[in-house]
């Protein structure tokens, strides 16, 4: 079944189209593109990412760059909250209709949360790049962030599409794009398998004039990766006191087979012993996983002997 989060994304995208973009001449091209995505939302694969995996991916550094998408259009169904606003006054200026009416009474407050309702990744005849469309909800206000991988990652500065640059600050943008790169790398991990689950009654639903239920991509994680994300990390969180924090992990790719021929000549068992793995693209990688550190240990008092 389609998740409540995905339905909220769909509702928000519809409101943005009708209230913010439809009657704005300067954003007609963006309107037609997003309108096409909106009407195909129930036809594209939905990847449901649970909270444990979301946290692990958001807390991993990665080199931002082009990754192949498994399909031309995909929806990443996850929830993530950000506190406060980057620039509330400019956000107000960018919104129209009921969104503006709701936002204009707001004041900058660090307690305000922006809730991510997911991301659509899509590629149309674009080499070494793909586009990112996301919907963010604050209270009952829906905003959007529409950009592309290279622009959001700071790799290229030219503006290829209009985007609401005030929804996220520079650090948050980088974190979101790293999350996307992490997820696409994660899909190629040998401990990860994906399987498309099609709804059996879709044909009958379409004949009755109803929207189809989207194909759901089931993510199966096995082995050490499963044990770490779903057993060890929750145990760390449970045992950690109030003053604890995430230590970010990082992805390392050894793309150059000539430079790293020793790694490429090793068998899978030897690679695993050294903390590496060969992913489904045939690339040797290393995912140094994030972990939770006890802040109290860093604050312990130490006695020092002062010599005369």
Image (spheres, helix red, strand yellow):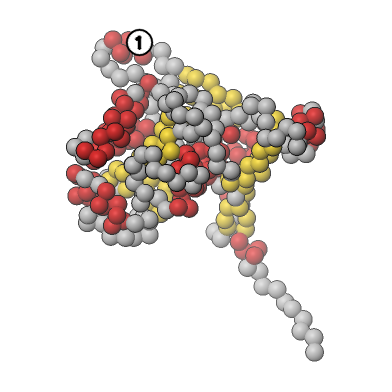
Nearest the eye: 274 or 145: 145
In the rendered view, tell whether residue 204 sits above or below residue 178. Answer: above
SS type, badge 1: helix
Nearest the eye: 41 or 151: 151
Q: Which residue shows up at 48% across the image and 40% down it?
A: 150
Residue named by callout 1 = 203
Would residue 16 be visible to someone looking at this image?
Answer: no
In the rendered view, tell whether residue 16 sits above or below residue 247. Answer: above
Residue 69 lies, in percent from the top left, at 51, 28
Nearest the eye: 218 or 121: 121
Residue 80 lies, in percent from the top left, at 44, 44
Rendering quarter of residue 258: top right
Which residue is outermost to the bottom? 308
Rendering quarter of residue 76: top left
Q: Which residue shows up at 75% across the image and 37% down it?
A: 259
Residue 3 lies, in percent from the top left, at 39, 30
Rendering quarter of residue 254: top right
Q: Which residue shows up at 34% across the image and 60% down it?
A: 109
Mark 1 neighbour density, 10 Å: few (under 14) some (14–19) many (20 or more): few
Which residue is outermost to the front? 158
In the rendered view, tell whether residue 70 sits above or below residue 176. Answer: above
Q: Which residue shows up at 32% across the image and 10% down it?
A: 204
Say left or right for 96 vs 250: left
In which quadrant will I find the C terminus? bottom right
Would residue 255 be visible to someone looking at this image?
Answer: yes
Residue 157 lies, in percent from the top left, at 45, 46
């Amino acid at each position: 079944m389609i998740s409540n989060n995905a339905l909220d994304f769909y509702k928000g995208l519809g409101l943005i189209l009708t209230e913010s973009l439809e009657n704005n001449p300067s954003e007609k091209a963006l309107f037609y593109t997003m309108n096409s995505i909106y009407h195909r939302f129930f036809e594209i694969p939905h990847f449901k990412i649970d909270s444990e995996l979301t946290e692990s991916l958001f807390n991993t550094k990665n080199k931002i760059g082009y990754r192949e998408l498994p399909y031309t259009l995909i929806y990443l169904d996850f929830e993530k909250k950000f506190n406060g606003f980057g620039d509330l006054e400019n956000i107000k200026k960018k919104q129209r209709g009921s969104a503006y009416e709701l936002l204009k009474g707001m004041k900058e407050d660090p307690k305000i949360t922006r809730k991510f309702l997911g991301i659509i990744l899509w590629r149309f005849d674009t080499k070494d790049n793909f586009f990112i469309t996301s919907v963010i909800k604050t209270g009952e206000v829906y905003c959007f962030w529409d950009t592309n991988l290279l622009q959001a990652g700071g790799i290229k500065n030219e503006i290829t599409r209009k985007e609401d640059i005030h929804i996220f600050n520079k650090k948050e943008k980088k974190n979101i794009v790293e999350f996307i790169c992490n997820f696409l790398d994660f899909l190629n991990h040998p401990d990860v398998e994906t399987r498309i689950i099609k709804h059996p009654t879709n044909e009958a639903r379409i004949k009755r004039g109803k929207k189809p239920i989207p194909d759901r991509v089931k993510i199966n994680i096995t082995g050490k990766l499963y044990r770490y994300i779903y057993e060890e990390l929750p145990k760390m969180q449970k045992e950690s006191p109030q003053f604890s924090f995430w230590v970010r992990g990082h992805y390392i790719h050894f793309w150059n087979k000539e430079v790293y021929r020793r790694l490429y000549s090793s068998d899978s068992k030897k690679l695993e012993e050294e903390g590496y793995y060969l992913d489904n693209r045939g690339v040797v990688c290393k995912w140094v996983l994030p972990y939770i550190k006890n802040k109290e240990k860093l604050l312990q008092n130490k006695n020092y002997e002062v010599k005369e």
